[in-house]
Image: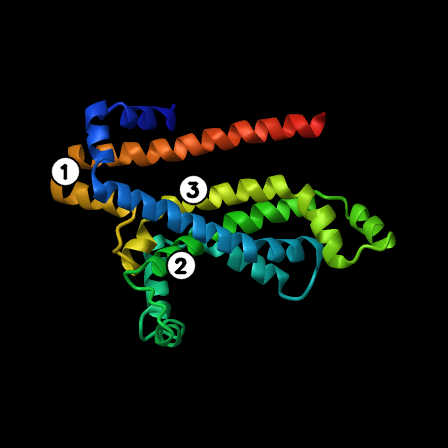
């Protein structure tokens, strides 16, 4: 009830006319598109680098492993305004990463790459942790059998490990995307523009009040809820298929 009541109250606080009017507002549509697109790109990067890292952490013990696992979890506990400042110092035009990349034409401050970087920092932990748990749940003997039958390391990974951990990867990816879409603190410091949906909601609330910000909030939460429900339905069908 603590979670349910505020969400339902928010959704029912705007009229259909107000929501339709905001859906026809180009600024609202653009901000939602920027949020969804940037979050998707951040999730893809998290998958490309996070899945191999998760497999290494699940299958190998090495010096410094605990330190790496701790670093992966750090973004969850750091205040996101602090994250924004930390990223700004690194990716600004004078930063240790932003300066050389800026000479190549890649700008992070007040640009889409900055939004993606901020989203990636705060959400990649979900992909790594969920995927690692998926790999850890796989019996290592299945991989060893594949190798004894002549499969190499990469073939074993793609034909055995990856398919069996796919559900965990999907779950982590969805959580990563959802967390990215909702990010505000780090984004507003590193890349206030172009406006993402949470920034637009804050801007309208600060400038025009609660009534003006609520319809945009309803649209954003409705999109996220619809995607979560769809994923739940797909996952339920996935589990039924696996049992069969």
Task: List x then y, in percent, for residue 125.
Answer: 51, 51
Badge 1 is on which residue?
209
**Nearest the camera: 21 or 82?**
21
Quarter of the rendering containing residue 1: top left
Task: List x then y, in percent, for residue 2.
Answer: 37, 27
Badge 2 is on which residue?
117
In the rendered structure, the answer to whether residue 60 lies left or right of residue 14 reads: right
Q: How is the image coloured?
A: rainbow
| Label whose residue precedes the other's in the sequence (3 or 1) | 3
CA distance separating discs 1 and 2: 30 Å
In the rendered structure, the answer to whether residue 144 lies left or right of residue 159 reads: right
Q: Quadrant of the C terminus?
A: top right
| Label whose residue precedes the other's in the sequence (1 or 2) | 2
Say which mark, if any, is on residue 178: 3
Quarter of the rendering containing residue 24: top left
In the rendered structure, the answer to whether residue 159 lies left or right of residue 25 reads: right
């Amino acid at each position: 009830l603590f979670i349910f009541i505020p969400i339902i109250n928010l959704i029912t606080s705007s009229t259909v006319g107000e929501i339709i009017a905001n859906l026809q507002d180009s600024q609202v549509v653009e901000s939602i598109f920027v949020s969804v697109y940037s979050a998707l790109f951040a999730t893809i990067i998290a998958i490309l680098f996070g899945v191999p890292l998760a497999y290494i952490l699940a299958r190998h013990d090495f010096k410094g492993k605990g330190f790496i696992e701790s670093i992966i979890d750090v973004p969850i506990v750091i205040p996101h305004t602090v994250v924004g400042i930390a990223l700004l110092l690194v990716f600004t035009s004078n930063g240790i990463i932003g300066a050389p990349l800026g000479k190549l034409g890649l700008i992070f401050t007040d640009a889409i790459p900055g939004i993606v970087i901020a989203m990636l920092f705060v959400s990649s932990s979900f992909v790594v942790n969920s995927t690692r748990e998926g790999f850890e749940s796989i019996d290592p003997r299945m991989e060893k059998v594949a190798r004894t039958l002549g499969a190499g390391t990469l073939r074993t990974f793609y034909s055995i490990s990856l398919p069996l951990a796919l559900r965990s990867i999907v779950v982590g990816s969805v959580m990563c995307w959802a967390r990215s879409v909702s990010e505000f603190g780090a984004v507003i410091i590193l890349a206030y523009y172009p406006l993402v949906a949470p920034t637009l909601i804050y801007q309208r609330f600060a400038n025009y009040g609660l009534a003006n910000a609520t319809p945009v909030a309803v649209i954003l939460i409705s999109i996220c809820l619809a995607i979560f429900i769809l994923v739940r339905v797909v996952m339920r069908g996935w589990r039924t298929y696996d049992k069969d």
